[in-house]
Amino acid sequence: MEKRWCSACGEAFEPRPQAPRQSYCAKAECQQSRKRLWQRTKRKTDHDYHENQAQAQSNWRGDHPDYWRRYRESHPDYAADNRQQQRRRNAKRTSRQREKAIANSDASSGTLPVQGTFRLIAIDPVTWAGRHEWLVQITSVS
Ligand SMILES: [Zn+2]
């Protein structure tokens, strides 16, 4: 039987014959991370999907106005953790805006980051031993 390594947990698994391109094992948390990646990609690439998701979430919040306030009150550890993460995201956002302002100050179009260090993760083929990642330096030639 062919063995593969799960893209989420890195453990070996046998792909189901019905899913020849399967790259995640059957564990619930690995299937969840596969779905999360799919949704994240779909939201970024499909404008209608993004709009529908945002509208559905907005509707749900409208129908459950106290849900998150009550959840935070009954889960103080979660709330504290969340506040800390939000502070980190805010700091990151500020530094990104600074970087964007610097990148836009020259004559480049500024739409894509064409230079920098990127993490390259092998998704396919998954028949190698384990998960493969590289740090890649991209510099402009022209
Ligand atoms: Zn897995």
Image: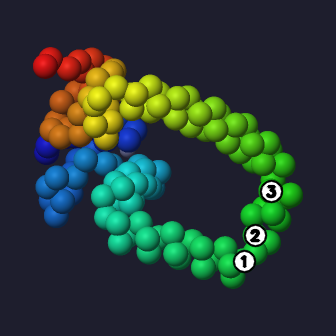
Residue 116 lies in quadrant? top left
The C terminus, quarter of image: top left
The local crowd at label 3, few if under 14, some if 14 to 19, many if 20 or more residues have their Cα within 10 Å, is some
Would you place residue 126 above or below residue 132 in this image?
Answer: below
User: Amino acid under label 3?
Assistant: Arg
User: Amino acid under label 1?
Assistant: His
Label for residue 142?
A: none
The local crowd at label 2, few if under 14, some if 14 to 19, many if 20 or more residues have their Cα within 10 Å, is few
Which residue is depicted at the point 61% across and 38% down?
A: 89
User: Amino acid under label 2?
Assistant: Tyr
Residue situated in front as seen by the camera: 74 or 128: 74
**Residue 111's x, y, as percent?**
31, 41
Tag 1 residue? 64
**Residue 79's x, y, as percent?**
78, 48
Which residue is depicted at the point 28% across and 37% down?
A: 109
Label for residue 72?
A: 3
Report helix, strand or loop for mark 1. Answer: loop
Dots 1, 2 in contact, CB < 8 A? yes
Report helix, strand or loop for mark 2. Answer: helix
Q: Is residue 71 left or right of residue 125?
A: right
Question: What is the distance, in whole Å, between disc 2 and disc 3 at their CAs?
Answer: 9 Å
Report helix, strand or loop for mark 3. Answer: helix
- Quadrant location, ligand no. 1: top left
The local crowd at label 1, few if under 14, some if 14 to 19, many if 20 or more residues have their Cα within 10 Å, is few
